[in-house]
Image: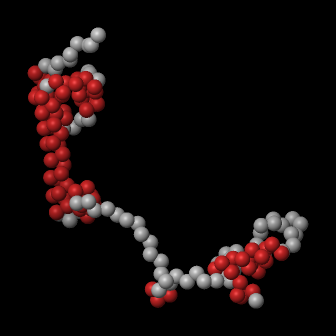
């Protein structure tokens, strides 16, 4: 059996536009002591109620937007960026460009061979009792403490 239709008093209806400017639909429903679905049902059944709700939301958005634009025009960089991202389709892309010597391409020749040589040295190394099997030998470290060394310097 369907429930009784909820109606608002004229005083409550007059508050809708003001409340819609500052409250979510759920908060408005709580204020009137009804559920969200009932609030939306009221909007579906009552075009005047729906119009008041929409007008209140639009006025709040307009006032905030006007303030944002004023700040952006006044030089507030954060407001400018926010406005352009939300209204002009701007977006940030994180892109890291890496170049080699003199802006040229990064040379990776020899990297595979150096890695194979390092792995071969470690595979041939005897395990010393009490030392972790994965610990690099002292001479396998370059000046920065990296375990990778240039195989060319070991020849």
Q: Which residue is more in the foreground, 89 or 71?
A: 89
Q: Which residue is more in the foreground, 142 or 1?
A: 1
Q: What's the residue at 22%, 60% (across, down)?
A: 88
Q: Quadrant of residue 54?
A: top left
Farthest top residue in view: 1
Asked if 67 appears above or below 49 in the picture, the reply is below
Asked if 113 appears above or below 35 in the picture, the reply is below
Q: As drawn, is 103 to the left or to the right of 28? A: right
Q: Which residue is more in the foreground, 112 or 49?
A: 112
Q: What's the residue at 37%, 65% (across, down)?
A: 93
**Count of labels in the image:** 0
Residue 145 at least partly seen: no
Q: Position of residue 120 (x, y in %)?
A: 77, 76
The quadrant the N terminus occupies is top left
Q: Quadrant of residue 132?
A: bottom right
Q: Position of residue 62 (x, y in %)?
A: 15, 47
Residue 125 at least partly seen: yes
Q: As drawn, is 94 to the left or to the right of 31? A: right
Q: What's the residue at 47%, 77% (across, down)?
A: 98
Q: What's the residue at 45%, 86% (across, down)?
A: 103
Q: Which residue is more in the foreground, 53 or 23?
A: 53
């Amino acid at each position: 059996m369907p429930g009784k239709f909820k109606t608002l008093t004229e005083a409550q209806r007059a508050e809708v536009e003001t409340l819609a400017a500052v409250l979510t639909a759920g908060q408005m429903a709580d204020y009137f002591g009804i559920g969200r679905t009932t609030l939306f049902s009221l909007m579906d059944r009552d075009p005047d109620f729906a119009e008041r709700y929409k007008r209140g939301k639009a006025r709040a958005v307009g006032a905030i937007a006007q303030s944002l634009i004023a700040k952006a025009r006044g030089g507030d960089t954060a407001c400018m960026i926010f406005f352009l991202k939300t209204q002009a389709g701007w977006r940030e892309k994180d892109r890291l460009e890496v170049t080699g010597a003199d802006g040229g391409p990064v040379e990776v020749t020899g990297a595979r061979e150096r890695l194979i040589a390092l792995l071969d040295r470690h595979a041939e190394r005897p395990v010393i009792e009490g030392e972790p099997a994965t610990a690099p030998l002292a001479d396998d470290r370059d000046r920065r403490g990296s375990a990778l060394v240039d195989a060319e310097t070991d020849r």
